Every structure is written in structure tokens, then in C-alpha cells.
Image (spheres, helix red, strand yellow):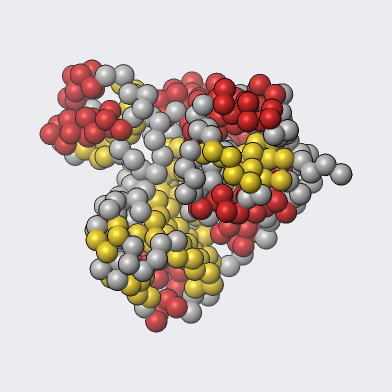
Amino acid sequence: MIQKKLLMLNSSIHDVPLILEARKLGYYVITTSNKPDYPGHSFANEYINCNYMDYDALVKLCKENDISAVSCGTSDNASYAAAYLGEYFGWKGHDNLETLKTLHFKDKFKQFTKNLGIKAPISKAYFSEASAIFDSRLHKFPVIIKPVDCAGGQGISVANNIDEYEIAIHNAFEVSKQKRIIVETYLVGTQHSFISFIVDQKVTNYCSWDDLPYPGRFMISKGAVPASYPNPEYVNLVLIQEIEKIAKALKLVDGLFHLQCIVQNGEPYIIEVMRRTPGNWDTYMTTNASGINWDQWIIMAESGMDCHGIPKMRKTEGFWGYYMILGSKNGRVKDIVIDNKIKKNIWRMSLWKPIGHIINDYQNDKLGLVHLWFNTRDEMNNKMKHIDDLIAVVY
């Protein structure tokens, strides 16, 4: 019997669970990227060096290697490539390229939410630095400025006055490859992730958690399940209704639909959405909380398999957390110290960089990942609040 082949477009450490699930499903997994040192390659059956932004090269690679399915992993850019390949070869499992751009480019998505009546912060798009600066006095501070095409908190700033606004505008345009940004009302509330699985444009499963940023950064590096927003039945219902409204309007294919939201005064406002797997092994955490293997069903959906058999809504049980180990400055890592108060809560820990590693970009250099389990919500909330002190990098 000839083994079917799946192309994993991204192969970072965050894609490893997806690579392993694809292999469990019987696929011969080929990873690709122009970064041969990415750790995901060693978990695949084969690595072929190819820049996944070069669509013609990807088509050639797929033809020469009899590939019949593709996964975008945890990358926005790879999601566009997967959509292109799906359209080119007629593969199921991915939305078309224009639909993905509507969802993933922040300016397009905010215009879409406005037209559809989706609960989202008020925002305005800008295509030049000069026009954004010209409008500086029209905005009510504080505002949050974002490049339309970046993930992981890159280029995002909050401005409390005109001086900060002008600096933030410049920084956002510098980072954006599309040279487009949005200026958005800064909502004061709590931030959360809401992961869902849709079949026939209906939500069949979901899980929510608190997004807990590292001090001074917009990159989300830690989280706690379940989400702590008040009146969860109401908030979850609103988000499910909004997702299904989006899915119907765009005729979304079956699979994962992930969003981030701000809950302000009990009302959820959607700030970002994505049709690719979030990083930080979030789905690994939600699998343990819900008892449903999210990575398996994501791969099944991306490869065009029938997903009607996914177990129906299961309530999450227990109290879970994850913590991405990051440094507080550049320098050589001497040790990673874990306080005795948190040791008993750790059920899995992976160090991705060795002791002695030199951090040159402390904002983004992820040293490892810790998964945690707690007896009570109070214990979870208290320890996650102080997690940066309980797990610390020593220089």
C-alpha cells in the first residue's frame, strides 16, 4: 500500500505536535522551509529545503513528491501558501486565499466585522505614515497601533498622547511588510483566547483561556484554562454566535477557528482571528483540558478528511496553565530556577535552549515551555499571577 504524503509548510518547535499527529494518522510527513535548523524537521519523515513563500517552487515540490495534503502549521504566511496549494490542486481542507486575507489581515478583518455587525473594537486603517500622523488629533487616547500583517505582538504599541502616537505609527509601518497599519480603540478589560472547531459552519467544540502577556510585551507567553471572565455561559454563547456568523458569511471549510478577544464590562470584543493553529502548544493544553485531541482533528481537517465524527461539545475539566520561558534581558543563561512552590504543579517541561545559551533577542527568544496543573481555580490564578517570579532565568 502506498503511503499518503502530507507537506508541513512550517516546522518550528510549535509545529511538532501537529507533525507527530500527522504521522500517527498514517501520513508520510515532509517538512519544508528555507531554515534547515528548525527543530520540526527532525520529527518528520523527510525535509526538503524550499521557501514556502515561493508558490511556484511549492507546486513543483508537491508534483515531484506525490504530495496529496498540506498543513500550514502555526504560521500565518504558511496559511496563505496552503490556501494557494489547495486551490491549485483542488485539495480540500483550506479556505481560499482571499478568504484567508480577509480574516488574517487586520484592516480587512476589521472592515469585514463592521460590515457584518461583529462585536469588535472601533479601528481605522492607514496606508501611509503621513496620513496616520495627519489624523493624530482625531483619535481619543489611549489607542493601540498594529501592523496589519504581523503576529506574536510584533510592532504593536499603545499610545497615550500624540508624541507616543507618532513613534508608534513609525514603528508599526517599519515592521509591516504590507506597509499598512490600523489604529484601534484601546479597550480596558481582560484578554482571552477562544479556540473552536467548526463543521458545516457550526461550532462543535470550543475551549477558552486567559491570555497572560509577559511584562512589557504584547506577545502572549502564558495562559490559564478555563478563562476567568464572569458569566462564561453568556460570553461563550456570544462568541459562538459570532463565529458561526463569520463562518456562514465566508463559507468557511471545516476545521479550527481561533480568536482572541477582550472582555470589557462582561461583553466580548473580537480583536484577532486565525485559521491556523496558535503557537505555544496551546492545543496540547486544551487537549488535556477537554479530552479531545485537537491536533489530530486539525490535521484531519487540513487534509480534507471527514470531520463529522468529532466528539461533540465536552466541558473542560480541571485547571491548567502553560508558561513560555523567556528572558528579561539579553545575556548568557546561567540557569533556570524553579521555585518549590510551583514544582508540584509542573507535569511537563521542555527546555529548547541549553544552559549557556546566549540571548540576543530577549523579546522573542523562547527558551522552553512548561505545562502546569492546579487543584483549584484560586491556586491557578494566584500562581499564574506570580509565575514570572516562580520560574526565572538567571544570567
Q: Residue at x 30, y 57 (%)?
A: 359
Q: Residue visible at 52% across and 60% down?
A: 225
Coordinates of residue 272 in the picture (x, y in percent):
45, 37
Q: Position of residue 89 (x, y in %)?
A: 70, 24
- How many numbered dots are placed on residues in this image? 0
* Location of residue 30 with respect to 366 vertically, above or below: above
| Residue drawn at the location 49% of the way across and 68% of the way down | 349
Percent position of residue 113, x then y: 48, 27
Please provide percent x and percent y for residue 97. Answer: 57, 23
Q: Quadrant of the C terminus?
A: bottom left
Q: Nearer the viewer, residue 276 or 252?
A: 276
Quadrant for residue 29, please give it. Answer: top right
Q: Can residue 166 be seen at all in this image of the molecule? A: yes
Residue 40, relative to residue 84: is it above or below? Answer: below
Query: Does residue 386 appear in this view?
Result: no
Residue at the far left: name it: 163
